[in-house]
Amino acid sequence: MQDTLTNLRIKDGVAGPPTGPLTLEDLYKQHRMRLVRLALLLVDEPSTAEDVVQEAFAGLHRNWKGLRDAQAAVGYLRTAVVNGSRSVLRRRKTARDYIPPHVANARSAESLAMLTAEHQAVVKALQQLPPRQREVLVLRYYGDLSEAEIAEATGISKGTVKSTASRALDALQKIMAG
């Protein structure tokens, strides 16, 4: 176990105490591998772990003049790697949870083939109606909902449901005739 730790320290570049003022290059040589291993344990991808560490060192370089001492730099790097890893994990979760928006007007070829010609004409005409009119007609005649249920589902008044349905049927009739 001690041999392994010694080998890791040598690989990290921590062979002995630094001579002279500590530079960003010294920090990179001494702590890069240790920080990559830390990031790797957090993000599970070597290339992403290296990117996180690289971003941490870039941030340190931008803030180099504002550091108190070398120990503050190591703490800054460690915190930046942990925060960068958290950001990567958050982005992964967001990407996994993303559901692309549903295209309401797209129909599959199979479903269109199964519809009768008249039914296809009605569906095509419905697609030309404004969204509210289309919603009201679909809920009324395909969903078999009452005017009160449609009003509740769409958030409009019962009177608006009646007038919208009437206008929608007139528009649908004109579309189908023309």
Image (tube, grey):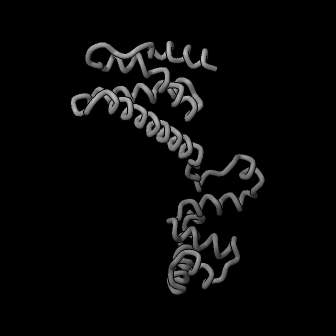
Q: Nearer the viewer, residue 58 or 156?
A: 58
Confirm whether residue 138 shows in the render.
Answer: yes
Q: Is residue 49 above or below residue 26?
A: below
In this figure, what is the number of numbered marks? Answer: 0
Q: Quadrant of residue 37?
A: top right
Residue 59 showing in the rendered view: no
Image quadrant occupied by the C terminus:
bottom right
Q: State the image quarter where residue 13 is shown.
A: top left
Residue name at image x 46 percent, y 26 percent:
51
Which quarter of the rendered picture does the N terminus lie within?
Answer: top right
Task: Looking at the picture, tell me which residue is in the foreground, 76 or 7.
Answer: 7
122 to the left or right of 33: right
Q: Which residue is located at x 65 percent, y 59 percent?
A: 121
State the residue at coordinates (53%, 60%). 128
Task: Name the residue furthest left.
Answer: 65
Q: Quadrant of residue 18?
A: top left
Residue 40 at what x, y percent from top left?
A: 55, 29
Q: Is residue 24 above or below residue 146?
A: above
Q: Indicate whether 99 appears above or below 150.
A: above
Whether residue 121 sits left or right of residue 80 in the image: it is: right
Residue 136, image x and y in percent? Answer: 58, 73
Q: Percent x, y for residue 135?
A: 58, 69
Q: Residue 35 or 166: which is nearer the viewer?
A: 35
Residue at position x 71%, y 52% in the image: 112
